[in-house]
C-alpha cells in the first residue's frame, strides 16, 4: 500500500471565519481582534480578543439526525467542544465523501473500523455561571466554608457539569456523530496541541492501523478565568488603544498575547485512495516532529532547543533540506520570551537557510488561538500557496533585532517551490513542526 499521506479535508473556525475567510484576512492584512463581546471585560487588565463570528453553527451541512444530536447535547458541550465539533464537521464535509442519507450509517463508503481521530486541546476552564450559585451557597463572611461547599454548594452543581469541560469530549462527540471506530486520542498540549495531534495521526496511519484520520485542535482563551490567569502570568496585552494593532508577532514593540479562540481539523488519507476516488488534495504531509522544551514550567528555552529539535525531526522525516522550503509559518504569539525562543530554534534548525527562507506568522490577524494555532496556519498556507505568495506579518513594523530570521514584513513575497514548514510551541512544554507539500 502507498503510505503517502495527504490532506483531503480542511475545517476551520476562527475569528476571521472559515479557512478561506482567514486566508483572505491574512492576505489583506485585516485584523479580527476587537473588544470582547461574550462578557463584560472592561474591568480586566486586557479587554480585547479574537472571537469567532456570532453566527457560528456547528451543525451546518450535517444530516438531520446529526443536527438533533448536537442540539440535544449542547448543554454538555463547552464553547471549546462545540467549536471543535464544528471544525471536524467542516473537514469531513470538505473531503467530498458521501455523508449518506438520514437512516443510513454516516459516511457509507468508508471502513469505519479504520477511521480514527486525534484532537489536541488545552484544559477547558469552567464558566463563572457554573460556579456562582454553589459558591454563594457555601460562602460566609466572604469566605467559602468547605463543609458548606459539600452540604450546600455541590448539590447546586449541574450533575453533568464535568462533561462540559473534559478535553477528550471533542473527539468523543465527533466520533459518535460520524461513527469513528478506529484509533482515538486526546492530547492536552496547549499551544502545540493541533500539530502534535497531526504528528500522532500521521504515525498511526504509517503503522497501517487506519486508512482515514482526523487531526484537530480547539481552544477558547476568551474566558474570565483565563484572562485573570494570563494577566497574573504577565503574558497579556494590557495597553492597546487600537485592538487591530495589538498583536505584534516578532515586533520590537510587541505587547504580549491577545487571547483568541477557534478550532481546526484536517482529514488525512493515503494518496492512492484519495486519487482513486477523485478527491481534491490540499497537500501532502511529508514529515512531522515533536519535542519538549526544558526551560521550566513558565519559561521557554532561550536558545530554542526544543523548537530546533522538532523542526529537525520534521525535516529529516520529510527528507528535505532547509533551503528547499518555500515558506515557514512560525508560531509567533507576540510574547517576547516565546518569540525569541522560537526564533532562536528556527535559526539553529534552518542554518544558512534562515537568511533566505521567508518566515511569516498570522497571529496579528487572529490573536492567540492556543491549540488551534498550527493547524490554522496550515490551512492558511494551503490557501495562499495557490497565490504563489508568502503573506507579510501583520503589525510587525519594526522587527526585533534579536530575531535573526528572514521575516516577511510590509509586502508579500514570492513563494518559491511548494514546501511549507509550520511550527508551534507551548511555554514550558511541547513543541511541534510539520513539513507539507502544498498543492499550488
Image (cartoon, grey):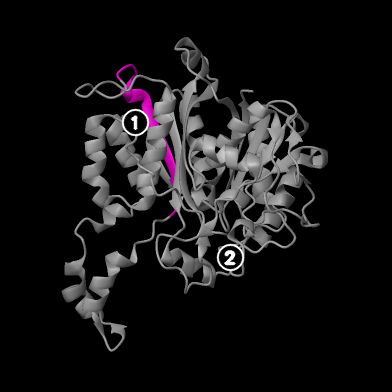
Name above or below for residue 406 compared with residue 182.
below
Q: At 49% across and 36% down in the image, what residue appears?
A: 200
Q: Position of residue 214 (x, y in %)?
A: 43, 32
The label shown at residue 235 is 2
Pick the front one: 259 or 374 = 259
In the rendered structure, does residue 121 fall within the stretch colored magenta? yes
Q: Mark 2: few, some, or many residues within 10 Å (few <14, many ≥20)?
A: some
How far apart, in angstroms, are the residues tagged by discs 2 and 1?
Answer: 38 Å
Residue 306 is covered by the magenta coloring: no
Q: Would you say residue 100 is visible in this rendering?
A: yes
Q: How many marks?
A: 2
What residue is disc 1 on? 61
Instruction: Tell me where residue 87 sits by quadrant.
Output: top left
- Residue nearer the viewer, 207 or 337: 337
Whether label 2 touches label 1, CB < 8 Å:
no
Eyeballing the image, is 2 above or below 76?
above
For the magenta stretch, what is the residue range? Answer: 108-122
Picture residue at 71% right of the left edge, 43% below the top: 392
Residue most extreme to the top: 276
Secondary structure found at label 2: loop
Pick the front one: 191 or 35: 35
Task: Indicate the quadrant where residue 57 lies.
Answer: top left
Amino acid at each position: 500500500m502507498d503510505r503517502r499521506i495527504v490532506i483531503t479535508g480542511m475545517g476551520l473556525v476562527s475569528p476571521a471565519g472559515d479557512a478561506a475567510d482567514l486566508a483572505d484576512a491574512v492576505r489583506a492584512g485585516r485584523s479580527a481582534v476587537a473588544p470582547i463581546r461574550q462578557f463584560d471585560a472592561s474591568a480586566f487588565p486586557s479587554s480585547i480578543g479574537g472571537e469567532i463570528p456570532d453566527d457560528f453553527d456547528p451543525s451546518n451541512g450535517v444530516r438531520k439526525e446529526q443536527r438533533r444530536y448536537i442540539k440535544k447535547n449542547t448543554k454538555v458541550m463547552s464553547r471549546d467542544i462545540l467549536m471543535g465539533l464544528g471544525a471536524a464537521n467542516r473537514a469531513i464535509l470538505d473531503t467530498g465523501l458521501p455523508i449518506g442519507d438520514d437512516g443510513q450509517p454516516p459516511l457509507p463508503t468508508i471502513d469505519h473500523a479504520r477511521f480514527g481521530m486525534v484532537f489536541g486541546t488545552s484544559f477547558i476552564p469552567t464558566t463563572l455561571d457554573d460556579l456562582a450559585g454553589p459558591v454563594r451557597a457555601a460562602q460566609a463572611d466572604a469566605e467559602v466554608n468547605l463543609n458548606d461547599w459539600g452540604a450546600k454548594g455541590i448539590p447546586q452543581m449541574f450533575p453533568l457539569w464535568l462533561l462540559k469541560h473534559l478535553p477528550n469530549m471533542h473527539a468523543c462527540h465527533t466520533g459518535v456523530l460520524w461513527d469513528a471506530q478506529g484509533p482515538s486520542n486526546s492530547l492536552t498540549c496547549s499551544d502545540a496541541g493541533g500539530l502534535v495531534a497531526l504528528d500522532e495521526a500521521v504515525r498511526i496511519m504509517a503503522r497501517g492501523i487506519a486508512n482515514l484520520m482526523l487531526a484537530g485542535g480547539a481552544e477558547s482563551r476568551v474566558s474570565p478565568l483565563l484572562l485573570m490567569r494570563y494577566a497574573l502570568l504577565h503574558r497579556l496585552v494590557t495597553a492597546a488603544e487600537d485592538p487591530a494593532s495589538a498583536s505584534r508577532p516578532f515586533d520590537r514593540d510587541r505587547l504580549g498575547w491577545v487571547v483568541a479562540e477557534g478550532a481546526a481539523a484536517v482529514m488525512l488519507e493515503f494518496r492512492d485512495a484519495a486519487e482513486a476516488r477523485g478527491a481534491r488534495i490540499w497537500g501532502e504531509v511529508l514529515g512531522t516532529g515533536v519535542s519538549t522544551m526544558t526551560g521550566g514550567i513558565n519559561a521557554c528555552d532561550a536558545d530554542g532547543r526544543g523548537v530546533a529539535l522538532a523542526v529537525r525531526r520534521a525535516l529529516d522525516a520529510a527528507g528535505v533540506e532547509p533551503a528547499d522550503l518555500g515558506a515557514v509559518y512560525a508560531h509567533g504569539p507576540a510574547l517576547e520570551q516565546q518569540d525569541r525562543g522560537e526564533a532562536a530554534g528556527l535559526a539553529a534548525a534552518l542554518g544558512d537557510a534562515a537568511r533566505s527562507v521567508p518566515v511569516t506568522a498570522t497571529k496579528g490577524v487572529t490573536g492567540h488561538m492556543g491549540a488551534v494555532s498550527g493547524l490554522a496556519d496550515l490551512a492558511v498556507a494551503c490557501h495562499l500557496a495557490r497565490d504563489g505568495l508568502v503573506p507579510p506579518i501583520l503589525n510587525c513594523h519594526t522587527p526585533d533585532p534579536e530575531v535573526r530570521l528572514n521575516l516577511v514584513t510590509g509586502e508579500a513575497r514570492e513563494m518559491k517551490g511548494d514546501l511549507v514548514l509550520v511550527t508551534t510551541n507551548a511555554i514550558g512544554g511541547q513543541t511541534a513542526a510539520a513539513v507539507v507539500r502544498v498543492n499550488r
